[in-house]
Amino acid sequence: MNFAIFIVFSILFGLLLMILIIRSVASGIKKYAQEKLRGKTIIKEAPFARMIGQKSKGMWQVRGNGYLALATDTVYFFLAAPRREINIPLRNISQITFPTAFMGKTVFKKLLCISFSTPQGEDAVAWQVADPDIWKQEIERIAKKKLD
């Protein structure tokens, strides 16, 4: 009986520790992103966006959590670990779609997938966010404003 109680408490302690670590990392990446974006007008943000992948990085990449932000001229993503940034100027976006799978990975939910041009050619990134439709509407609204 004592051993069973020990196992239950060990599992609960492990889960609590994992939650605290995840919150700490998320808080750290949000602070880092906000410092990098200081002075920019942020239209929309997703502090816990999950990147499913980036086309140019190939099939063998891991998913990653980070901070996604839409500013008046760029979509920014700050990956928590390994720390990496993706900046997509709105003028370079060619398409926004909602696949349920990307680069052979799926979460069985609608993803926000942004295709864009780079000096090296076309690329695309997909994220799991709470409201991909609203992200698309906002990106298109801001991009249209830039053209007017």
Image (cartoon, helix red, strand yellow):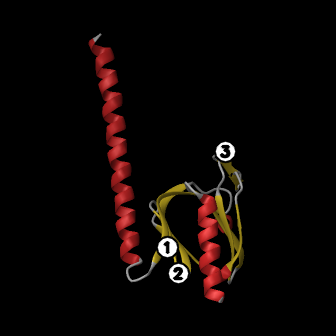
The N terminus sits in image quarter: top left
Say few, some or many: other residues with alpha carbon within 10 Å of mark 1 (under 14 / 14 to 19 / 20 or more). some
Say few, some or many: other residues with alpha carbon within 10 Å of mark 3 (under 14 / 14 to 19 / 20 or more). few
SS of the residue at dot 3?
loop
- Callout 3 amino acid: Phe
Q: Quadrant of residue 130?
A: bottom right
Q: CA distance from mark 3 to mark 1?
A: 27 Å
Position of residue 24 measured from the top left corner of the image (x, y, whole percent): 33, 54
Q: Which residue is mark 1?
A: 43
Disc number at residue 69?
A: none
In the picture shown, does residue 55 fall above or below 13?
below
Report whether residue 78 is seen.
no
Q: Which residue is mark 2?
A: 72
SS of the residue at dot 1?
strand
Name the residue: 37% across, 70% down.
Answer: 32
- Callout 2 amino acid: Thr
Question: Along the line of sight, which residue is nearer the eye, 146 or 23?
Answer: 146
Which callout, 3 or 2, points to the residue nearer the camera? 2
Report whether residue 20 is seen.
yes
Marks 2/1 in contact by CB < 8 Å: the verdict is yes
Marks 3/1 in contact by CB < 8 Å: the verdict is no
Name the residue: 63% across, 46% down.
Answer: 107
Q: Which residue is mark 3?
A: 108
The C terminus sits in image quarter: bottom right
Question: Along the line of sight, which residue is nearer the eye, 47 or 101?
Answer: 47
In the picture shown, does residue 128 fall above or below 114?
above
Name the residue: 39% across, 57% down.
Answer: 26
Name the residue: 60% across, 63% down.
Answer: 134
In the picture shown, does residue 107 fall above or below 30?
above
